[in-house]
Amino acid sequence: MEEKKLDIKSIIGFVLIFGILLFMMWQNTPTPEELAEQEKQEQLKAAEEAKNNEKEATTDTKVTTSEDFSNLNVGDSLKYEMLKNKLGAFVFAATLPSATDAQTSVKTNVFDLKFSNKGGFLSEVILKKFVDYDSVPIALIQDGNEQFNISFPTTDNRILNTNDQYFQPSVTKNGDNTVVSMKLKVSESQFLEYRYELKPDDYMIDFSIRSEGLNNVINSSQNIDLDWALKTYRHDQSITYENRYTRLTYMYEGDKIDKLAQAGDDEEIIEDARWLSYRQHFFSSILVADQPFKKATIASKTLVEDEEVDTIYTKEFASKLPLTFTNGEANNNFKFYFGPTDSKVLKAYDYDLEESIPFGWGIFGWINKSLFIPLFSFLSSFLPYGIAIIVMTILIKLLMSFVQYKQFLSQAKMRVLKPELDAIREKHKDNKMKAQQETMALQNKAGASPLAGCLPGLIQLPVFYALFMFFPTAFALRQKSFLWADDLSSYDVIAELPFTIPFYGDHVSLFPILAAIAIFFYMKMTTGQQMASQPTQEGMPDMAKMMKYMIYFSPLLMLVFFNQYASGLSLYYFISNLISIGIMLVIKNYILDEDKIHAQIQENKKKPKKQNKFQKKMAEMMEQAEQQKQAQQKRKK
């Protein structure tokens, strides 16, 4: 086809139209809306005039014709930037009828997605298999809560932002996979492309950014960064609870895991980042890089100003990530994960994404990943979730029952020795050092020590903390009901309050009340046993008073603090303390015999007892302290 060119008359016509438009603007001072409408009309006139003109232009510059423009698609913004100084913005825009904010919709078995022509990125991500606390489908991206932008410096010293440009969409098939291509075109052989490949049942999307033929347009000698920001929607019943577990987490330097601050605003510069997780409580948006980012700036901001007032967003995350250019062309491969923060799902990928879940550090995380998660997965595969919690609690308490036995045995021994220990303290009431020496000697001979009761208690702490981290992050509990609790991953409600109590909330949860009652009776029983086994000494009344306060303070803390927590966790504490009370009664009434313990202690006292290194060192230190004290007394005399 013969190429059509503009002649001198067309150019004069454009100049006159532009002059008339300027005069009208000056004369009538229209509103911005009126100005936009006038501009549109003039552009349409100019395009029609260019289309009907088939004569060659008498200019020293080759000018693209209206037919060339009509073949341009939504993504011709780069070409528009290069041409607008030659022809004027009106001509080019008028020939882009497809340059609108249209969206391309794609559905898979797990997603409802929309890709925006403007900016070329996802404008909507809906997870089809999940709903929020209000039965609304889970939206990770929707209504402009995200920003995805690349700022390109051009060779003529301008900046192009991709989120202001229009991309040409196309949807094809690659086997069972759906491929979405968004191209920002200069020509058919010159473009920037966002390429998405979606598998039918996969939450992971292959994503690449590449360019072709733009090395003379984009100035790749300067730093070119990808900005990815997201405001996280509220999905949970409790804003406080969800915000506590909504956090920017990242892996860097191979296998190190770190995170930004839980509350408030935070910003860091990190190196060799492998992936970034915009983790919400039970859903995550994760960017995985094929090649680690050499340096990245990440930030987090809390958006909840008043947790007692309904809010749309919980936090805002932002990252500035460097892109890689080879021979002036972009070629960057990533993966986007949009889906549940479920260890079972995340573990299926080879990127250690399950490490973004806060299972606890060190041994606590190991206990959760190696013991509690597999155990609960097994139990919940054939039991209702509430029953699975109860069965798991029973198994854990039975496994740890030997610890309770050791504690009660130690307390029983100390109770039997109490009269003798009190006699020693009375005998040496004016010489505390001597009293301490004889006390340690007696305990060593009898095979009884206060530390013997403390050490088993310390063994329980990793299990206690691991379970504290397990229940709030157990995705399997989400929206699973039990008895009066509608959702074991959120608080249960038996009464709504017409007002809000600070730190407590605007509702009454029953499971924390039951757990607090069980803790009260358990502490009352164990504290009584412990105080009865302690020898009478100076300061004991104050200690007894403090322990008495703890009996009431701990259940009150449980009542207030766990009113906003997962009902599954409160159910665990309730059952756990009931079982502990039962085990304690069985050990006390049917297993331990204080008469036999007393007889055994007397036998132990007759046998020579060899001191270990620690006991020997302590005895030597106390002996030296006693000698120094006697020397000081002699000098005073």
Image (cartoon, rainbow, N blue to C red):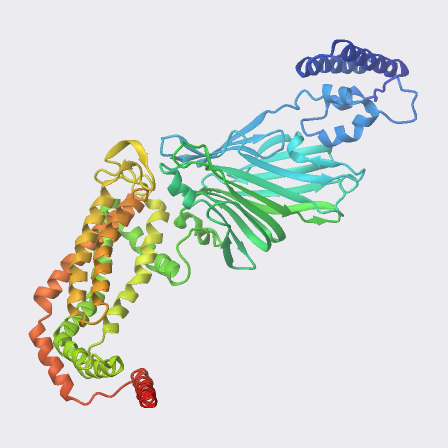
In-front residue for pair 359/595:
595
Which residue is depicted at the point 19% across and 52% down?
520
Tell me the quadrant of the picture where the N terminus can be found: top right
Q: Position of residue 284 (x, y in %)?
A: 46, 43
Please name whichever residue, 223 or 627, is drawn nearer the observer in this view of the structure. 627
Can I make out residue 562 in this image?
A: no
Write the residue at 48% across / 54% down: 352
In this view, 23 is above or below 313: above
The answer to whether residue 612 is seen in the rendering is yes
Q: Is residue 541 left or right of residue 268?
A: left
Q: How many marks?
A: 0
Left or right of 259? Residue 628 is: left
The quadrant of the rendering that contains the C terminus is bottom left
Q: Residue furthest front?
A: 637
Q: Is residue 474 above or below residue 117?
A: below
| 519 displayed left or right of 145 | left
Q: Is residue 170 above or below residue 399?
A: above
Residue 158: x, y in percent? 77, 36
Work out whether residue 328 or residue 393 is closer to the camera in this orientation and state it. 393
Residue 548: percent from left, percent from top? 20, 57
Quadrant of the rendered structure where residue 481 is? top left
| Residue 13 higher or lower than 617, as above or below | above
Residue 455 picture location, percent across and down:
28, 70
